[in-house]
Image (cartoon, helix red, strand yellow):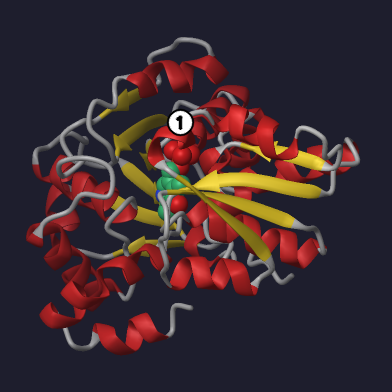
Amino acid sequence: MKLNLPSPVQEIHNPHYLEKGVRVFVKRDDLIHPLISGNKWRKLKFILSKAQSEVKNHLVTFGGAYSNHLLACAAAANYNGLPCTGIVRGEDVKNEILDKCTALGMKLIFVDRESYRYKHQIFEDLFGKDDQAYFIDEGGASEQAVEGCEEIVNELVSTFDHILCAAGTGSTAAGILAAIKKQKLSTRLQVIPVLKDGDFLKQAIEKYTAPDAAFELHQNYHFGGYAKYNDQLLDFIIDYYKQHHILLDQVYTAKLVFGLDDLIRSDFFKPGEQLLWIHSGGKTGLLGIRKKLTTKAPEFRQILEEIL
Ligand SMILES: *Cc1c(COP(=O)(O)O)cnc(C)c1O
């Protein structure tokens, strides 16, 4: 498996940033691997070594129908020659992501939304007798995931005043913060929750890093909730691609960069500061809004065709 590591850092040039006196850089974790994209690779790395050390060869994990984590897990299992089962939330769903998971050898089991809430129970019922089965939580959330995400900071060769990341479970943010603390950097972490009522993220992050004030949550950029979006966000994705040739996804990274630009506009950052946002990947999520995107911007037809 060819991995593009350490992932490159590049500057984003924009007259707006110049005007405010800030410099903006992006760490391109989206380029690590075409399918095991971004932070999902980082989160799986130590999960896989833990499974291996416990001699558990059958990966069992969970996700929604467009889960970046399911696809990443399927690709990682395929590469390592391990059997893999994906428990999918919702009955009778079918899409290109799940097709790709199947093609990579993942066995899919669909469960209704109510049962899905009890993941450990499902695992127990289905695989309680399979001593090879290894439970991987939805999104890969775990101590190992946090450890893997520390490498985002450990790979940097220069320091930044602020690092910005999107948050779903908060493991990525926790890993970045843990590494900032270990290295005793003065870098501050700005976290953009992609879901509504992201208050729980404060505890989720501090669970791994001990309470401190080196990070802030910016709760105004969820666009109505997890995986919710509107025309403004779609236009933002299209314009950003036209300007910078970087694809953002509507679930995570577009909300992050929209928030970043808004924070810059409202003078949240001081002139002279250097900012780094983490492109955590997720471009396959765009397949879920293919019609809407190509209606607005026909040039996305070609781009989306190349994604899977
Ligand atoms: C899963 C995911 C995230 C969220 O990471 P957490 O560690 O769950 O907060 C961010 N960006 C992308 C592209 C993702 O796929």
Q: x, y (%) of residue 186?
A: 45, 26
* Crowd band around label 1 with a 10 angstrom C-alpha radius: few (<14), some (14–19), many (20+): few
The residue sitting at 69% across, 30% down in the picture is 124
Q: x, y (%) of residue 214?
A: 40, 20
Front residue (pair 21, 68)? 68
Q: Which quarter of the rendering shows the N terminus?
A: bottom right
The residue sitting at 86% across, 44% down in the picture is 52
Kindly identify the amino acid type of the residue bearing the numbered disc 1: Arg
**Which residue is label 1 attached to?**
117
Front residue (pair 175, 58)? 58
Front residue (pair 1, 51)? 51
Relative placement, left or right, of 158 versus 6 is left
Q: Is residue 54 above or below residue 10?
A: above
Relative placement, left or right, of 79 versus 286 is right
Quarter location, residue 190: top left
Q: x, y (%) of residue 308?
A: 48, 78
Q: Is residue 108 above or below residue 125?
A: below
The residue sitting at 17% across, 53% down in the picture is 229
The residue sitting at 79% across, 49% down in the picture is 58
